[in-house]
Amino acid sequence: MSDITRLTAAELAQKLQAGDITSEQATQAHLDRIAAVDPTINAFVTVTAEDALATARDVDERRARGEQLHPLAGVPIAIKDVVVTDGVQTTAGSKMLEGWIPPYDATLVEKIKEARLPILGKTNMDEFAMGSSTEHSAYGNTLNPWDIERIPGGSGGGSAAALAAFEAPLAIGTDTGGSIRQPGAVTGTVGVKPTYGSVSRYGLIAMASSLDQAGPVTRTVLDAALLHELIGGHDPKDSTSLPQPATGYVKAAQEGALGDLTGVRVGIVKELTGEGYQPGVQARFDESVALLRDAGATVVEVSCPSFTTALAAYYLIMPAEASSNLAKFDGMRFGLRVEPTDGPLTAERVMAATRGQGFGDEVKRRIIIGTYALSSGYYDAYYGSAQKVRTLIQRDFTAAFEQADVLVSPTSPTTAFKFGEKLDDPLAMYLNDIATIPANLAGVPGMSLPNGVSDDGMPVGFQILAPISEDARMYRIGAALESALEKQWGEPLINRVPELEAQA
Ligand code: GLN
C-alpha cells in the first residue's frame, strides 16, 4: 500500500503545501487503493477518477504559479451518494434514482469545489438513508474493513468504510438519527453531526427535513474540524440555515490536543449507559471517562428521563417527514418510470408500478408508517404526541447542559454486527441508534470518536454532545480524549485495521 493513503488529511495538506507531494500523486494513490480494495469493500457506488485527477492537476498548476489556495486544496474527498453532484449520478442508494444525473451541486459540494478538493466519487448507503447497516442499499453491501463479515454501520456505511480502508482521507456523511456517528463508531473512524442548520441542506436528498444534517467523516478529530469549517456556514438557499459562520473548530481541536481539561464539566447521561450496552462497549466508555478525569475534567452524572422515549418519537417523526419528502418519486418527474404492462396507462397506475418496483422494503415500511401517523384521526395521537416528546427531550438537554458543558455516552450499544443478523428484525436494527437519536431530535451537535476495541476485536465509539452552536466544545474534548488514548495505544487505533489479504 502506498504510504500516502495512510496520511491524515491535515498531514496530506501540509505535505502538499510544502511541495513534498503533488495533488495528482495523492489523488492517484487513493484511486489505486480504491481499484485494489473496493471490488471487495464496495464503499463506492460511483468513482469519478477523471474528474478527480483533472482537479488535482489544476491545483498543482495553481500552486506552482504561487496562487493562494485553501488549506485543504488538493486533498481528495468522497461524498455520500445522497448529496447531489452536478453531472455525476446520484442514487441515494435507491433503484429509484439509478442513472439520475443532477443538473446542480449541493451547496456543500460547491464549497468543496471552490476549495479545489478532488472528488473521488460517491459512497454507498442505505436506501434514502434509512438503516444502520448499509444492507438496505440497492447497490450491494459495503463491507467493514475491520472484519469483512460485518456491517460498516449505516446509513453512511460507504463513507465510513472508505476512510477505514484508506480509500479516502476525508468524506461527507449525513446524519438524521445517527448515520454519521454510528458508522464512525463501528469502523473506528471519526464522525461529526454538526448543530442542525449549521451546514446547508441545499442539495441533500431529504429524508426527514427537521432532522437531516450533513457533516464530516474522517480519521482524526482535527481532520473533522478542518472539513467542518469548509462545509459549514450560512446559506440563503436553505431556509433553516443558521446565520453564523463555521469557525473556531480547528482552534478548539488544537487546544484540546494539548490535553488540559481543567474546569470542564463532563456529564454522563444515565439513560444512555449500562443495561443493553455490550460489556466491552461499556468498559471502554468507563475507561475513557477516567481519561477525561485525568485530564482535569469534572465528571458528573446527569439524568435525561425523556431520552427513553426518543426512539419511539423518532420512528413517528422521521417516517412522517420521509413519507412526504419521498412523494416526489412518482415516475412523472425524474428518476425511474415503470409503466404497467397490462391494463390502462393511467398516471395513478404508473405511480404505483414505479413506487412498487423503485423502493425497497425498508423505504416502503417507513412510507406506510409515516402516512399512517399523519392520517386524519391519528395525527394527534401519533405525530402530535411525538412532537410533544420532542419538546421534552429538548428540555432535558437544556437542563443537563446547566450541569455539564458536554454530555457523553457510548455512540452505539454494540460493535458491528454480522450481515443478516438484524435484517429480518427492524426493531433490533432501530435500537442501534438509541444513543444517537436524541441529538437529532433536539438539533444539538454530536461527535463519535474511536475509543478502543471490544472483546470481539471490533472498534467502539465514544459520543460527545454539546449545546446548540457550541460545536467547538466537542472538538476540544474530542481532541483531548483522542490524544490521551493515542498515548496509551502508542499509535492511532485505525492503524490496527487488518489488511484485506489477511481476512481472505
Ligand atoms: N439508522 C437511522 C435510521 O434508520 C438513522 C438514519 C440516518 O441518520 N440517516 O433512520
Image: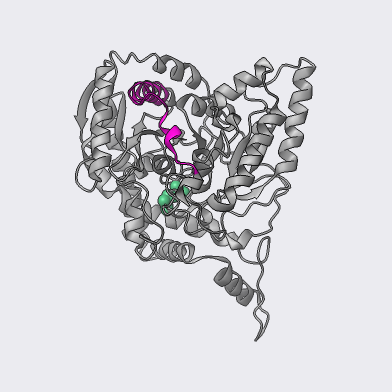
Question: Does 306 lie within the magenta span?
Answer: no
Q: Is residue 480 magenta?
A: yes
> On screen, 367 above or below 146?
below
Q: Report whether 359 appears left or right of 18.
A: left
Residue 190: where, in percent of width, then height? 44, 34
* Residue depicted at 50% across the width and 20% down the height: 250
In the image shown, does 37 or 53 lie closer to the viewer? Answer: 37
Residue 148 screen position, x and y as percent = 45, 51
Q: Quadrant of residue 53?
A: top right
Coordinates of residue 218 in the picture (x, y in percent)? 50, 33
> Which residue is depicted at the point 71% across and 53% down?
101
Q: Nearer the viewer, residue 390 or 141?
A: 141
Q: Which residue is at a point 34% across and 50% down the rendered structure image? A: 432
Residue 340 horizontal/vertical position (percent): 64, 79
386 lies above or below 232: below
Colouring convention used in this rendered image of the protein: one colour
Q: Is residue 117 visible?
A: no
Can residue 405 be spotted in the picture? yes
The residue located at (75%, 42%) in the rendering is 50
In the image, taking residue 464 as reference, residue 89 lies left or right, namely right
**Residue furthest out toward the bottom:** 343
Q: Which image quarter is the N terminus in?
A: top right
Of 319 and 261, which appears nearest the observer? 261
The answer to which of 123 and 420 lies nearer the viewer is 420
Name above or below for residue 20 compared with residue 75. above
Magenta region, main secondary structure: helix
Instruction: Identify the magenta region.
Output: 474-499
Give the tally of numbered discs. 0
